């Protein structure tokens, strides 16, 4: 079996099957919009409502009111218009192109870059390219963390397997299977980040290949989080955390450890994995 490969995954949606490969994940003259979750608004409103009931009103048992409020939020939310992966044509600009200086700033959301922006990034010096690449990985890990079950522990990978595997994302997956795929996706992102220790970030030609792999991972994360939204996994996790912690004092406190901490603490530890990943991806040859 050939040890070198392109990343790949499949998707089943509305009885249609789609295939994705890092071989084909090139930047375009346009700037497709990354999927924006409808649950961002719902969770924001729900969190404010719960804090009011718990902290301001000091209600002893607000669960019934919370459930009803959540039902009302869904009824007032046009799901058909908000839950979508539809994109404008690939050559359409949906935002102003970023300058080289703006490209170095951590984006507020995951974005797809235009060919012009990619060309600017390809010409960055090594220090600036590494800074940009770290910011990209941090943005992806931060999104994964929004969907991660808080009680689940993620550990960095040691094998190329996680970037080689080709999952099928569909509505046939259970919530637990979707959560497993999110964990595998995290490991895939760390495999990709391990390339920061290799010459893949130094050569302009290899940087082009790295862009393909990064674009592919963004599409996978987009499709997976979309499917998790259809299964209401973020809402379920939020309610589960509330029930677990309330009325303890820890309710509402953020995590002290973040998934993206690996970016600042493990670069040297990822060198061996980075060499294996670089030797495996066809786009980096």
Image (cartoon, grey):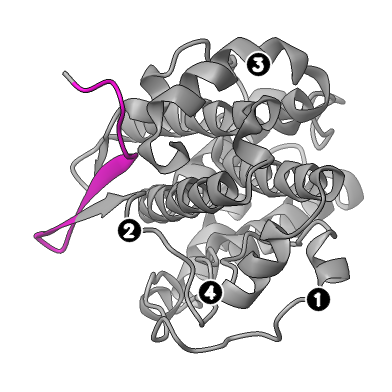
- Tell me if residue 217 comes above or below residue 148 in the rendering: below
* Of pointers 1 and 2, the one earlier in the residue sequence: 2
Q: Residue at left 50%, top 78%?
A: 76
**Rendering coords of residue 148 (x, y %):** 56, 34
Q: Is 67 placed left or right of 201 in the picture?
A: left
Along the viewing direction, whichever of 160 and 188 lies nearer the viewer: 160
Q: Residue at left 39%, top 58%?
A: 25
Which labelled disc corresponds to residue 33? 4
Mark 3, secondary structure of its residue = helix
Asked if labels 1 and 3 touch by Cβ distance under 8 angstroms, the answer is no
Over which residues does the magenta segment extend?
A: 2-18
Q: Residues within 10 Å of mark 4 (few under 14, many from 20)?
A: some
Along the viewing direction, whichever of 284 and 97 lies nearer the viewer: 284
**Rendering coords of residue 182 (x, y %):** 45, 34
Asked if labels 4 and 1 touch by Cβ distance under 8 angstroms, the answer is no
**Rendering coords of residue 40 (x, y %):** 62, 61
Q: Residues within 10 Å of mark 1 (few under 14, many from 20)?
A: few
């Amino acid at each position: 079996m050939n040890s070198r490969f392109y990343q790949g995954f499949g998707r089943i949606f509305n009885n249609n099957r789609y295939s994705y490969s890092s071989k084909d994940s090139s930047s375009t003259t346009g700037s497709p919009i990354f999927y924006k979750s409808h649950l961002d608004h719902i969770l924001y409103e729900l969190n404010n409502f719960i804090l009011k009931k718990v902290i301001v009103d000091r209600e002893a048992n607000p669960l019934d009111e919370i459930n009803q409020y959540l039902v009302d939020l869904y009824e007032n939310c046009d799901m058909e218009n908000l839950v979508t992966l539809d994109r404008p044509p690939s050559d359409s600009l949906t935002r102003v192109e970023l300058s080289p200086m703006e490209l170095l700033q951590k984006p507020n959301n995951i974005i797809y870059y235009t060919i012009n922006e990619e060309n600017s990034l390809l010409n960055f010096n090594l220090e600036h390219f590494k800074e940009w690449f770290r910011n990209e990985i941090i943005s992806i890990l931060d999104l994964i963390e929004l969907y991660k079950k808080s009680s689940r522990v993620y550990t960095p990978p040691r094998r190329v397997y996680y970037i080689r595997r080709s999952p099928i994302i569909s509505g046939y997956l259970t919530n637990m299977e979707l959560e497993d795929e999110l964990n595998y996706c995290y490991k895939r992102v760390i495999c990709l980040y391990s390339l920061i220790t290799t010459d893949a970030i130094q050569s302009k030609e290899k940087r082009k290949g790295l862009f393909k792999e990064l674009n592919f991972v963004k599409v996978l994360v987009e499709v997976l989080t979309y499917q998790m939204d259809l299964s209401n996994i973020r809402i379920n996790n939020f309610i589960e955390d509330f029930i677990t912690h309330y009325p303890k004092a820890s309710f509402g406190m953020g995590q002290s450890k973040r998934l993206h901490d690996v970016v600042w603490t493990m670069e040297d530890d990822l060198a061996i994995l980075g060499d294996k990943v670089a030797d495996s991806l066809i786009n980096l040859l």
